[in-house]
Image: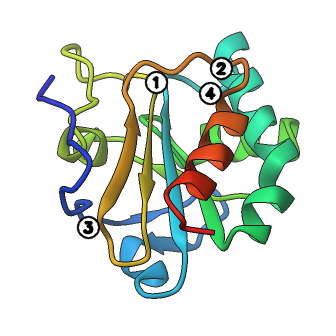
Amino acid sequence: MSTHLEPGAKAPAFSAPAADGTTVKMSDWKGKKNVVLFFYVKDNTPGCTREARAFRDAVERFDEKDTVVLGVGVGSAASHARFAANNELEFPLVVDVDGKIAEKYGVLKSSGKSAERATFLIDPDGKIRHVWPKVSITGHTTEILEKIDELGLA
């Protein structure tokens, strides 16, 4: 695992498929929206399910703050699609089968088979504004929403 990126760093660009068959690019939101990029360990596990559902339940509040939510997991498109369908997730789940995106963000576990649970808040200029390297699921979405307000990004 490499080192986490720090606030102030430029968010690494990527273009990757999402579970719904679309292609997600960081540049899609450049100059338009904040991005909450959350890395999760594995589809359909208890902790990741709770985390994804918390983001699902807060999506409208993120929308109100001009912020898009993207989940990234080191899993297949089919697995992500089942996870999204089972949990009614309406935000993109980015497919990172080879772990390259997680590696760019410094959250790929040493096994290379999963990412650490971590969240990055990225502003419309593509700059990382805050990093949560060790996510506690309970209250995490509220923390992010408060940080968006605190940093004047809403």
Query: SS at mark 3?
Result: loop
Is 141 on the left or on the right of 3, as rendered?
right
Which percent across, then down, holds residue 107? Answer: 28, 30
Q: Name the residue under label 1.
A: 117
Q: Name the residue under label 4.
A: 43
Q: Residues under labels 3 and 1: Cα distance?
A: 19 Å
Dot placed on the residue nearer the N-terminal end, 2 or 1: 1
Dot placed on the residue nearer the N-terminal end, 1 or 4: 4
Pick out the residue farthest to the bottom.
31
Query: SS at mark 1?
Result: loop
Q: Residues under labels 4 and 2: Cα distance?
A: 15 Å
Pick out the residue farthest to the left.
2
Residue 139 vertical placement versus 5 (above, below):
above
For badge 4, the amino acid type reads Asp
Comparing labels 4 and 2, the label whose residue is closer to the camera: 2
For badge 2, the amino acid type reads Ile
Q: Name the residue under label 3.
A: 13
Which percent across, then down, holds residue 8? Answer: 22, 56
Whether residue 74 appears in this view of the structure is yes
Comparing labels 3 and 2, the label whose residue is closer to the camera: 2
Q: Which mark is residue 137?
A: 2
Residue 94 vertical placement versus 131 (above, below):
below
Is 23 on the left or on the right of 133, as rendered?
right
Q: Residues under labels 3 and 2: Cα distance?
A: 26 Å
Dot placed on the residue nearer the N-terminal end, 4 or 2: 4
For badge 1, the amino acid type reads Arg
Is 21 on the left or on the right of 104, as rendered?
right
Q: Do the residues labelled 2 and 1 touch (CB within 8 Å)?
A: yes
Q: Residues under labels 2 and 1: Cα distance?
A: 9 Å
